[in-house]
Image (spheres, rainbow, N blue to C red):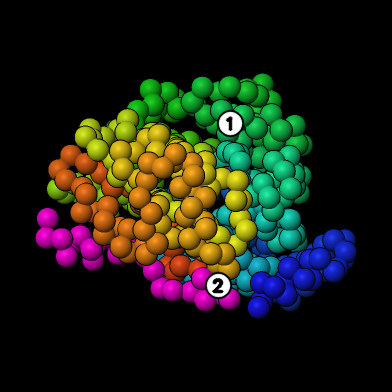
Amino acid sequence: MKTMIKKLIKKLVPAFLINYYHLFLAFLGALIYGLPSKKIKVIGVTGTNGKTTVVNLISGILEQAGFKTASLSSIMFKIGLKEWPNKLRMTMPGRFTIQKFLSEAVKQGCRYAILEVTSEGISQFRHKFIDFEAAIFTNLSLEHIEAHKGFENYRKAKGRLFESVKKLHIINLDDEQAGFFLQLPAENKYGYGIELKAGKDQVKQIVQAKEPKASDQGISFKVEDIYFSSRLLGEFNIYNCLAAIALGLSQGIDLKTCKQALEKVTLIPGRMEEAISSPFKVFVDYAFTPNALEKVYQSIKREFSLNKIICVLGACGGGRDKWKRPVLGEIASKYCDQVIITNEDPYDEDPIEIIEQVFEGTKGKAEKILDRREAIKKALSLASSGSAVVITGKGCEPSICLKSGQRMAWDDREVVKEEFNKLGK
C-alpha cells in the first residue's frame, strides 16, 4: 500500500514540487539538530561499488591516528566504540536520521563522520545542508539506470555531491568516468590508482599502488617506499585501500599509520566474506551489479586454485533495473560451472518472474530454486574439496524484502553455516 501511494504521488505531483519538498525536509532536519555538520568534519564516499569498504577503511585509519570517528554505511552505524546494525535497508538514510546521527556524533566528541552517499539520496537532497569536508569517488558503472532515466543522469546525480563539496575531491584516476569528476572545481584534489589512466596533471597529489598483487591470502602493494598488505580479497580492494590512504594523507596522516590501520582490517562483513573455509570454500558477497558480480567471479577464479565454482544469485525486485537481470545471469554462466538462480528481494514483484528474467541470460544453463535456503543447501551439496560456492546479492543484509513492506529475517552467512552443519561434510 505504501509503495502504491508513493507511485501515485509521483504521478500526480509535479517534479519541482517533490524536489522542493525533499529540499525543505533536508533544511528542516539540519535546523532541528542544530546544523551539526559545521561542528565535525564530514567525509562523503560515493560511487557504484566499494563505498561500504572505503567507509570502514577510512574510519580505521582516522582511529589509528587518534581521532574519534563516526561512520554510517549500508551495514552499520558507528559512533566512537558503539556500533549497531543498519536495519533500515537504506544505504543513505533519510535527512532526519542523518542529521540526528551527526548531532549525536558531535555530542560524543567525534572529530570525523564518514558517510556513504548514494545517487538516490542525492536526487532527494539528503546531502544538502551537510557541510562536507571531502568527497571521494570510487567508480561508476551501470546501475539505477531506470530510476535516473539513463546513465548520464545517474552520473550527474553523483556529480552533484562533488559540486556541493568545495574543499577536497579524491578521485579514482583509473575509472573511465574520472574525467567527469576531475572537471568539477575544488580547492584541493587527490587522485589514486594503479595505472593512473587519467588526470595526473589535474590533482595535487597522487596515491599510486606499485607492485600490486592479489592472492588467496589477500592483497599487497607499495605506496612510495611503504609496503602494504591486507587480508581483504580481490584486486578491487587495492583501489578501496588507496581511496582510504588518500583521505588519510589529505588529513596529515602518514603512510606508516595508514599501513598499521589497514593491516588490522581482516574482513568487511558481507563483502567477499569467507563463510566456510574447509573442505570447500563458501564466499558471501553483496555484489548485485553486473560490474561488481564480474569482479567477484574474476577475483575468485584468479586468486584461488579451484576445480569448480558453484554460484547462487538472484536479482532485486521493486522495478529496480530490470535490464540487468539477464546480464547477471549471463555473467554467472560465463564464470561459474553450476548456476543456481533464486529469490533475493522481490518487494512487490513476482519472484518467479524475476528468476525467469535472470535465467534468460544463462541460455538455459542454470537451475531455478525459489526458496533461497533450499538454493544454498543445494549449492553446498554440490560442493566438494577444491571447489567454491559463491553466494551474491545480499551480503550481510539482515532481511529479505517482500511485498507490502513485509520483511523476513535473513542472513546469508548464518544460513550457510546452518545448512553446512546439517550436511556433516
- The front one of 173 and 120 is 120
Q: Position of residue 281 (x, y in %)?
A: 23, 47
Q: Position of residue 235 (x, y in %)?
A: 40, 34
Residue at label 2?
403
- The front one of 274 and 84 is 274
Q: Which residues are magenta?
A: 402-425
Indicate which disc residue 53 carries. Answer: none
Does the CB distance between marks 2 and 1 fall below 8 Å?
A: no
- The front one of 55 and 254 is 55
- Of marks 2 and 1, which one's residue comes earlier in the chain? 1
Vertical position of residue 358 compared to residue 34: above or below? above
Q: In the shown orientation, is residue 43 left or right of residue 416? A: right
Q: In the shown orientation, is residue 18 left or right of residue 276? A: right
At horizontal 61% and vertical 55% (from top left) the residue drawn is 320
Residue 211 visible to an observer of this rendering: yes
Amino acid type, residue under disc 1 in the picture: Asp
Q: CA distance from mark 2 to mark 1?
A: 37 Å
Vertical position of residue 280 compared to residue 414: above or below? above
Residue at label 1?
175
Q: Main secondary structure of the magenta part?
A: helix
Question: For the residue labelled by badge 1, is the local secondary structure a helix, a strand or a loop?
Answer: loop
Q: In the shown orientation, is residue 103 left or right of residue 310? A: right
